[in-house]
Image: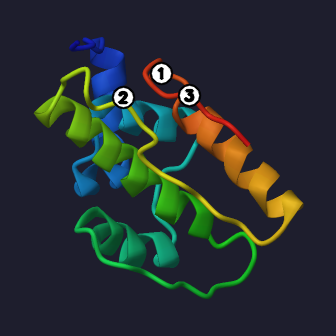
Amino acid sequence: MEQKMDKKSKNVASDNAFAKFDFDDRLIKMIAEMNWETPTPVQASMIPMVLSGKNVLARARTGSGKTAAFLLPLIQNILQLNIERPSADMRGPYVLIVAPTKELTSQIFTQLQQLIAPFLLFKLSI
């Protein structure tokens, strides 16, 4: 199912520095709506690695963008999976996220909910 974007959305998406990662247009639009204009240093280095399927261990200060650096490529990879193989056999789970604390789990869950708002094909559970 293809979702068309209006001209204003396309301009927002093309002006966003996250567009260099070749994310789905809907994901770029959500990033713009969250007012994320430029990837943080940790995001700029991690996102390409996660997109290419590499295992990544990142250590950075709180608020550096680590959560988004993992979530954005995961969402993109799931979208690609569904585009490339849209069969009924492709039911999830696609991703299992493990976090060491309840607080971090809640933070990840909240950010993931915000990012996948335009994609009705995902379900989340804690």
Q: Are marks 2 and 3 in contact (CB under 8 Å)?
A: no
Height in image: 47 above or below 92? below
Mark nearer the N terminus (1 vs 2): 2
Alpha carbon distance from label 2 to label 3? 17 Å
Q: Quadrant of residue 117?
A: top right
Q: Who's the residue at 22% across and 68% down the image?
A: 52
Q: What number of labels is visible?
A: 3
User: As rendered, which of 39 and 74 lies closer to the eye?
Assistant: 74
User: As rendered, which of 73 and 55 lies closer to the eye?
Assistant: 55
Mark nearer the N terminus (1 vs 3): 1
Circle 2 is placed at which residue position?
A: 26
Marker disc for residue 47: none
Q: Are marks 1 and 2 in contact (CB under 8 Å)?
A: yes
Circle 3 is placed at which residue position?
A: 123
Q: Secondary structure at mark 1?
A: loop
Q: Position of residue 3 (x, y in %)?
A: 27, 13
Kind of residue sitting beneath label 3 = Lys
Q: Who's the residue at 64% across and 85% down the image?
A: 60
Kind of residue sitting beneath label 1 = Pro
In the rendered image, the residue lying farthest to the left is 84
In the rendered image, the residue lying farthest to the front is 89
- Crowding near pointer 2: few (<14 within 10 Å), some, many (20+)? many
Alpha carbon distance from label 1 to label 3? 12 Å
Kind of residue sitting beneath label 2 = Arg
| Quarter of the image where the C terminus is located | top right
Height in image: 82 above or below 94? above
Circle 1 is placed at which residue position?
A: 118
- Crowding near pointer 3: few (<14 within 10 Å), some, many (20+)? few
Residue 86 seen anywhere in this rendered image of the structure: yes
Q: Secondary structure at mark 3?
A: loop
